[in-house]
């Protein structure tokens, strides 16, 4: 993790915040920064090793980073208590629906364009990673 | 002899050190339990950490702003980490350039379905507007989802918890749903899990199949961008 590339991330975030606030976009500044960094990498056509390591280092503990915000739910426990049925129904139905729609559209388009899955090995076990949200 | 415990507690509870330390400890305990349980999605480390911390704060009668004074140092890193998500997104994008349009179309369909179905069910069940707006970005990775919730009038901390629950639901029900639909294409399976249940689903997909894991990771990044752009438009049309 190098100081130079941490600065890169902060500069992109800062530019993102300025664009987001300046243009009054409903997009969060860091997301604009992420989009800009992605475009920069696509235009460069290459990923600096230092940036790869720095990003990897930060993202390795991504799920730690939203613990403090998650704890803030203690100020809104009444919402969970009063509305847990509606929340549970929305989460379960919507998650299953999203999985179905995404998979069916992908399979449908693959058939349409003839780009059906080339090599899909049976049950090839990948690397295990921690469950970031 | 030194000060008695009450005085030490009074001192510590006013410094950021305590909030920061218990956050790191709780997260590591959560990770330890999750690892011991063979990465069972039901024992999500963040959920364990959040439950432990809420419990500790309530037992010690500490209010959230006091805790956050310390925890904000961790929280601050969410911004740069969100920007850093561009790196894995770029790495996955490189691998699938040829089928990118098809993939993008599937993810956009998933992104819109996620938002519309969550809003429709929540509305039908009569949940409050605050909660509804917090549920809408639930399929997106937490750092982006919280930003979206903040920008659209939801409650970011409620969104953080709902995002984690969505990830767990996707990891548990994903295989079952895809098998019921007879989807055998690992690319489609990965995209579906990553779009619906972000990093938690992606971690699950990686355990099962490498191709599915790579597509899930791509879907998680793209769906974050897509939802950040589309959700404010969708909400604008509805409300």
Image: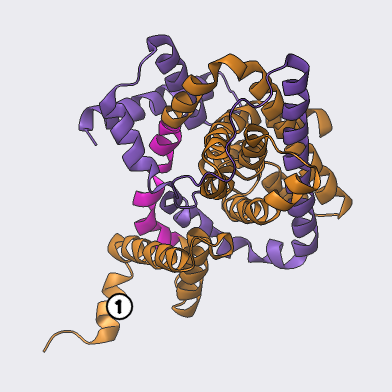
Quarter of image, res B189: top right
Residue A88 rendering spot, x and y as whole percentages: 75, 59
Dot 1, how many residues are within 10 Å of its Cα: few (below 14), some (14-19), or many (20+)? few
- Asked which secondary structure carries label 1, the reply is helix
Q: Which residues are magenta?
A: B65-85
What is the tally of numbered marks visible in this picture?
1
Give me the residue at 70% from left, 27% from top.
Answer: B106
User: Is residue A62 in the magenta section?
Assistant: no
Q: Position of residue A127 (x, y in %)?
A: 44, 46
Q: Give whichever of B110, B184 is nearer the camera.
A: B184
What color is chain A drawn in?
A: purple
What is the residue that sits farthest to the top in this orientation?
A: A43
The reply to whether the magenta stretch includes residue B70 is yes
Q: Quadrant of residue A104?
A: top right
Q: Residue at x 65, y 27 (%)?
A: A117
Residue that appears at 71% across and 38% down = B184
Q: Residue B134: x, y in percent? A: 67, 47
Relative to B60, does residue A10 appear above or below in the rendering?
Answer: above
Q: Quadrant of the C terminus of chain B?
A: top right
Q: State the residue at coordinates (45%, 33%).
A: B85
Chain letter for orange, please: B
The correct choice, above or below, for A49 with respect to B180 in the image is above
The quarter of the image holding the N terminus of chain B is bottom left
Q: Nearer the viewer, residue A22 or B36?
A: B36
Which chain letter matches label 1?
B
Q: Which residue is mark 1?
A: B9
| For residue B3, side relative to residue A21 (left or right) | left
Q: Residue furthest left?
A: B1
Residue A18 in view here: no
Residue B72, placed above or below residue B10: above
Main SS category, magenta section: helix
């Amino acid at each position: 993790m190098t100081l130079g590339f941490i600065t890169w991330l902060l500069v992109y975030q800062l530019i993102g915040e300025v664009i987001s606030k300046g243009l009054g976009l409903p997009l969060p500044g860091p997301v604009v920064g992420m989009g800009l960094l992605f475009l920069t990498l696509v235009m460069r056509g290459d990923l600096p090793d230092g940036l790869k390591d720095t990003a990897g280092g930060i993202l390795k503990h991504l799920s730690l980073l939203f613990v403090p915000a998650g704890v803030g739910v203690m100020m809104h426990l009444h919402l969970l208590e009063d509305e847990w049925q509606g929340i549970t129904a929305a989460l379960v139905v919507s998650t299953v629906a999203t999985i179905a729609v995404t998979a069916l559209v992908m399979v449908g388009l693959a058939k349409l364009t003839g780009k059906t899955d080339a090599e899909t090995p049976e049950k090839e076990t990948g690397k295990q990673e921690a469950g970031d949200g | 002899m030194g000060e008695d415990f009450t005085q030490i507690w009074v001192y510590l509870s006013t410094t950021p050190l305590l909030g920061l330390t218990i956050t790191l400890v709780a997260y590591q305990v959560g990770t330890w339990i999750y690892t011991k349980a063979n990465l069972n999605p039901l024992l999500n480390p963040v959920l364990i950490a959040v439950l432990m911390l809420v419990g500790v704060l309530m037992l010690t009668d500490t209010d959230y702003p006091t805790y956050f004074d310390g925890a904000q140092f961790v929280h601050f890193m969410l911004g740069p980490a969100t920007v850093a998500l561009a790196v894995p997104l770029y790495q996955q994008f490189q691998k699938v350039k040829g089928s990118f349009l098809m993939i993008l179309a599937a993810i956009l369909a998933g992104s819109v379905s996620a938002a519309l179905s969550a809003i429709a069910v929540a509305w039908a069940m009569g949940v409050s507007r605050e909660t509804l707006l917090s549920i809408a970005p639930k399929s997106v990775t937490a750092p982006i989802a919280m930003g979206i919730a903040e920008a659209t009038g939801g409650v970011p901390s409620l969104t953080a918890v709902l995002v984690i629950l969505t990830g767990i639901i996707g990891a548990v029900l994903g295989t079952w749903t895809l098998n019921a639909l007879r989807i055998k294409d690992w690319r489609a399976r990965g995209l579906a899990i990553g779009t619906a249940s972000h990093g938690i689903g992606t971690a699950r997909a990686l355990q099962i199949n490498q191709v599915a894991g790579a597509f899930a990771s791509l879907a998680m990044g793209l769906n974050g961008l897509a939802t950040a752009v589309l959700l404010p438009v969708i909400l604008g049309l509805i409300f």
